[in-house]
Every structure is written in structure tokens, then in C-alpha cells.
Amino acid sequence: WSQRELRVARDEVVSGSADDRRRFDEIHHDLRSLVAGIHGASAALTRYRAFLDPHEQVELESALTAEIRRLQHALSTVQTGPNPFAVRPVLEPVIVAERACGAVIHAELADVEVLGQSDAIAALVQNLLTNARRHAPGAAITITTRAVAGQLILVVGDDGPGMPDAMRRRVQALFNEHAGAGLIPLECEVDGQPPLSGSVLHETASRGSGLGLAICARIAAEQGARLQLLD
């Protein structure tokens, strides 16, 4: 979107419904997270290039290119349907960009292919990682993916202090509210076998939630996935 289109959309939202305002806030939140990741990767390349080995430079450059492409797609009004995509190359640029923003992330990503919207899954994971980075500063974050019985299991966790009980109940209620509302089945292909329907995405509890987790719940529902809080 151009600046003019964003201003027009903002003005329409002011007099629009609560759903319109919420959607506008979600778009703003996602774009801000994307720009932050791009800035982090760009700053790391500019400031520390002399201290980076060739692999690290290529990793950051690839992440920067991928995140700029995702930003361009997010600003486009053209919506694409579900397509097969490999999980690892979609998530790796997001992880690299979050590391460039200061997050300490240990990743174990399985080589699996799913049917869905790759940018949506990247946005979901970015929101989970950003949430952990912001609300559990200094905590070590882990992200793992694996295939179990034809389902993609994605776990994002950290070793932070965790959520207060009251907040945990609110977040779980949010996840439950969106459960089962999926429009697009996210399917998983393992070892060349035909895809099987269904997907489960988990997040371990970290302090804080806010708009980011609400966006995650919406994306998961749209992709036919399920979010669950773990201890």
C-alpha cells in the first residue's frame, strides 16, 4: 500500500466497525514486526560485516531478501491461496531476522513440506518469536518442527518466567475461541508420502501476550491449525 492508501484506510477505520479497527491494528502490528526484522538484519550487515564469516553474511543477506519479499507481498492487495511449500526455508529467514534483533534462538527444523500460505505461517512464527523476545527479555528461545502422524507440530518456547495465571487463562480462551474455525487445511508431507490433513502448532507460555498472540490465533484458524499453551 502507498502512504495515501494507508491514510485512507486509517480514516475509514476510524468510523468503521470494531472488526475493521482490529484488522487495521493487526496489519500495522505485522508490518512493524517485518520492518523491525529487516532493519535488524540490515544493521547487522552494515555494522558487523567485517566480523562475520562468509556463511553468516550469506545467511543475513538471504534473510534480508526474503523478508523484503514478504513485506512487498504484505503490502500487495493480491491474495494467494494455499500452495505446497517447504517449512525450513520459509522459517529460517524469520529466525535469522529475529536473531539480528537480539533474540537468542535455538532452532531444530525438520525437512517437511506442507500445504498452506507460506507468508501466513512465517507471520505466525514471527509473532511468536517477537512475543518471546519482547516479553521475556534475555530468555533463550527454542523453536522446533517435526512431523507426527501426518501433522506438522511446531513448538516455540522460552526459559522466561512464564505467564501469570490470569493472563494464561485469557490467552487460552483466545486460542479456544479460534479453534476449529480454519478455512484452509494445512497439510504435511513426510518422506514423499501423500499429504495428510491437519496441523497442530504449540506455544509454551511466556510473560505477556497482547495483539501478537491474537494475530497468531487468527492466522492459525485461517490455516486450519490449532494453538495450544504448554507448561
Image (spheres, helix red, strand yellow):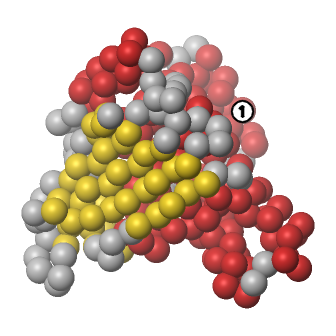
Q: Nearer the viewer, residue 118 or 151?
A: 151
104 sits left or right of 35 in the view? left
| Quadrant for the C terminus in the image | top left
Give me the residue at 10% from left, 63% from top. 149
Q: Is residue 120 visible?
A: no
Give me the residue at 18% from left, 76% from top. 190
Give me the residue at 55% from left, 57% from top. 105
Number of marks drawn: 1
Going by the numbered disc 1, the residue's amino acid type is Arg
Element marked by disc 1: helix
Give me the residue at 15% from left, 54% from top. 198
Q: Pointer 1: what residue?
A: 7
Quarter-of-image position of residue 109: bottom left
Quarter-of-image position of residue 169: top left
Q: Give percent across and percent down for residue 217.
A: 36, 35
Q: Give percent across and percent down for residue 82.
A: 30, 62
Q: Give percent across and percent down for residue 129.
A: 53, 47
68 sits left or right of 129 in the view? right
Q: Which class describes the residues within 10 Å of circle 1: few (<14), some (14-19), or many (20+)?
A: few
Q: Give percent across and percent down for residue 17.
A: 47, 16
